Image (cartoon, rainbow, N blue to C red):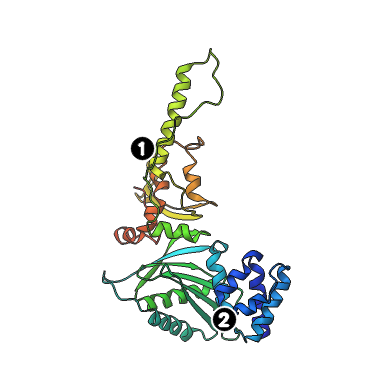
Amino acid sequence: MDETVAEYIRRTVLKIPRDEIKTMLQKWGLLSETQLQTINFRQIKENISQDVVQLCEENSADIKQAAILDIIYNHVYPNKRVWSVYQMKKTGEETEFFDLTDFKKKFKRRLRSALKNVTINFREYEDNAIWIRIAWGTPYTKPNQYKPSYVVYHSQTPYVFISASVLKSNLPLLCQALLLASNYHDIREMELRSHSLNSLKDIVFKRYSQNFQTHYPRPLQERNVAPESADLRIIQENRSEKERIERVNREVFGDGPQPKLEFAQYKLETMFKSDPQMDVLDKKEPFRCLVKFSSPHLLESLKSLAPAGMADAPISPLLTCIPQKARNYFKIRERKNFFPGSFVSP
């Protein structure tokens, strides 16, 4: 076994929590149960990794097999990467039978026709998700296994989730390969990014629903008894306002937890309003700007604005429409001729 392969396997094992190493190695399937029984999984991870490497040497493991272990790790821990959503589009609405073998063949052929030094690995999962790992090289260097790109493609859907490597120059080539292999003709980034791959799937696959009410909250209880001299009318108004904010917030965002979205942006276009006598603008052109939002948990942050007193309830539709607009951005772009992911305010 090559030394670079041995080192890569060792580092991959070190990333895995010790209590889960055996389970992941079983999913990997390279080592037999008899070989796994020879490993003491209670020792420190460095020693475990060395034992795994030794057994892999006996099995003559290569880099393709080592890459599969990395796919398994990233499938279990997708939140270790930052994911972006891309949507593809066909010329018509026709549906085609998806052939996984043909998809793999076309994808590999397109990448390798442009770049010889590239490692491509596939792994299918039960939810029709195809995980693709691409390690990029150059015409003069071998593929860098430590900085791969990841693609998660759900067959029969136009959505692709990409966690790109630091080599941004390879992203157009990756998109071309996806279009060719999946028989689409256009692809655009939806401007939604997050560490939570499942939350992005909830948004684009409409598994997350706003305006969904499952229960009514109990009336808010005052923690302290108000003094007899307090204005009871003001106390009642404050209580009613809190209940109203809670009700409106529930109608807008729903009862359940929000998908974990970390980045969103849209294009704002509106007419500049001023006193005609001031003649501020010579030309009547719209005011344009690009609005970007980022937060460790963007939708939950927006949901908490009104209860915290930082915004009026209900929150502006410009903020609450982000998931819905993201799902429909292709229609918006066709109708308004705006950039991918752009949302418009009249």
> Where does label 1 land, which residue?
277
Q: Disc 1 vs disc 2: which is toward the camera?
A: 2
On screen, residue 76 versus residue 267, left or right, reads: right
Q: Position of residue 12 (x, y in %)?
A: 63, 72
Q: Which mark is residue 11?
A: none
> Going 52% across and 15% down the picture, which residue do you hit?
230
Q: What amino acid is labelled 2 in the image? A: Gln
On screen, residue 153 versus residue 133, left or right, reads: left
Q: Position of residue 184 (x, y in %)?
A: 34, 74
Q: Position of residue 83 (x, y in %)?
A: 50, 63
Q: Position of residue 313 (x, y in %)?
A: 42, 36
> Where does label 2 land, which residue?
65
Is residue 287 something that shows in the picture?
A: no
From the viewer's perspective, is residue 185 above or below residue 251?
below
- Frontmost residue, 69 versus 110: 69
- Frontmost residue, 278 versus 171: 171
Which quadrant is the N terminus positioned in? bottom right
**Quarter of the figure with residue 211:** top left
Label 1 and label 2: CA atoms lie apart by 74 Å
On screen, residue 212 versus residue 264, left or right, reads: left
Q: Secondary structure at mark 1?
A: loop
Q: What amino acid is labelled 1 in the image? A: Gln
Q: Secondary structure at mark 2?
A: helix
> Going 67% across and 75% down the picture, which residue do you hit?
10
